[in-house]
Image (tube, rainbow, N blue to C red):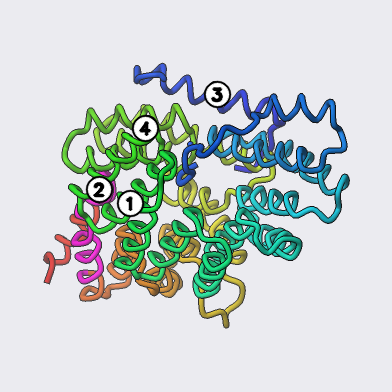
Amino acid sequence: MRPLLTGTSAAGLVAALTLGSAVVLGRPSGAPAAVRPAAGAPRPGIAGLQARLRDRPHDAAGWASLGVAYVERARLTGDPTYYPKADGVLRRSLREAPGNDAAPAGLGALAAARHDFHGALRHADRALAANPYGQRAAAVRVDALVELGRYDDALAAARRADAVRPGIPVFTRLAYVRELRGEVREARRVLRLARASATDRGDLAYIAAQLGEAAWNDGDLAGAGREYAAALRASPGYVPALDGRARVRAARGDVRGALTDRAEVVRRLPLPQYLTEYGELLESAGRRDEAARQYAVAAAWARIAEANGVDADLETALFESDHGDPEAALRAARAEYARRCPGPGVRQCSVHAADALAWALHVNGRDAEALRHARQATATGYRRPQFRFHLGVIEKALGRRADARRDLAASLRRNPRFSPLWAPRAKAALDDLGGAS
């Protein structure tokens, strides 16, 4: 996972590998996981901004807008080679007008996209010091606190942003913080309020997809299917909704439909999560060689991301734990945990980093150490079936049969079809323990 590639060859590799996989699989040809579709009044595209800046090279606002446009393009295409470009033009904006708030807000969004959440927080604070009403900076600040596992601080920041400048970006973040804290009913209430006030089709698609995700995590296939369908009606081709529909189709036994959706998802947005999920669906269908091709693209993406300043340790840890090198998984998981869970005395920690470290420790045979982190991942009440599955498997390996039976049963009770590859293994593990008590 360590060799670096130049920006040009990296972009070419993504295109070649992704297209190659699509062609080999014979799937249909034709945004990041939770990115909302473009919304609002039309804004100048990258080419338009570049043309304007050729005529107005000292336009600080123009440079900041171009930087944000590069970040958004990277997010919508999965191509991290836009990130160095964004960094350069955002810093140009600061040189032209050192006190402007748009550039640090953009640098915060860039840092978050690169998974530098401490940097994102610093930039967001700088932007808000210059303009306390900046919605982008406020949103970045909430996102950074969430990813650092500072859920109480994130909730306070979201409430503050809501008081200063309420809107859909704040509402949806407030809902996600509630969900991470286990407050699912409140999260859904906030999302429904947001939907009642939304008029833009992009906002409606984003909110519906988030409601679909909440329903999916609770094993409500009918509710999830309705919400993903609503998202696709609002914004046809919206990737998070296609991803959700693929999961629902697989859970209902429509493997062909799920594979079609998965092929379209990775064609549109070849991110590791989507590539890995496609590979796991193929593997569960007995198509191991085709699954291996998707895993190869996921591994390549991590190398490309690193070459363009992205910290991909979380993705690396999860992928290598399940489909690669356990030692590489543990190195990456430890590094990510150190960044997102700073210090033994810290009460809160990123549940995603804790889960990744627990699972990496497990696949390396270090279950006694893994147990603490697996418990940490499930401590907030966040309803992610995979987290409870990981905890149950670790408990089973330690001979804690009653605990393992409880947590494996909980993972399947929450959503008995949470993964075409891992849910059957959860059931097999539970059956080996004598079934649910």
Q: Pointer 1: what residue?
A: 213
Amino acid on which the number 1 mark rests in the picture: Glu
Amino acid on which the number 2 mark rests in the picture: Ala
Q: Earlier in the sequence, mark 2 or mark 1?
A: 1
Give the extent of the magenta segment. 405-424
Taking 431 as reference, is 146 left or right? Answer: right
* For discs 3 and 4, the disc positioned in front in the rendered view: 3
* For discs 2 and 3, the disc positioned in front in the rendered view: 2
Q: Earlier in the sequence, mark 1 or mark 3?
A: 3
Q: Classify mark 3: helix, strand or loop.
A: helix
Expressed as whole percent of the image width and height from the top left, the position of residue 250 reads 23, 39
Q: Pointer 2: what residue?
A: 224
Mark 4 to mark 2 CA distance (whole Å): 26 Å
For the C terminus, the quadrant is bottom left
For the N terminus, the quadrant is top right
Residue 184 visible in rendering: yes
Q: Nearer the viewer, residue 275 or 212?
A: 212
Q: Classify mark 1: helix, strand or loop.
A: helix
Mark 1 to mark 4 CA distance (whole Å): 25 Å
Q: Write the residue at 35% across / 59% down.
A: 193
Expressed as whole percent of the image width and height from the top left, the position of residue 397 reads 31, 67
Taking 119 as reference, is 412 left or right? Answer: left
- Residue 111 versus residue 286 in the image, above or below: below
- Residue 120 versus residue 338 in the image, above or below: above
Q: Nearer the viewer, residue 79 or 55?
A: 55
Asked if disc 1 and disc 4 are in contact, CB closer than 8 Å, the reply is: no
The answer to which image quadrant residue 182 occupies is bottom left
Amino acid on which the number 4 mark rests in the picture: Ala
Residue 361 visible in rendering: no
Q: Write the residue at 42% across / 44% down.
A: 323
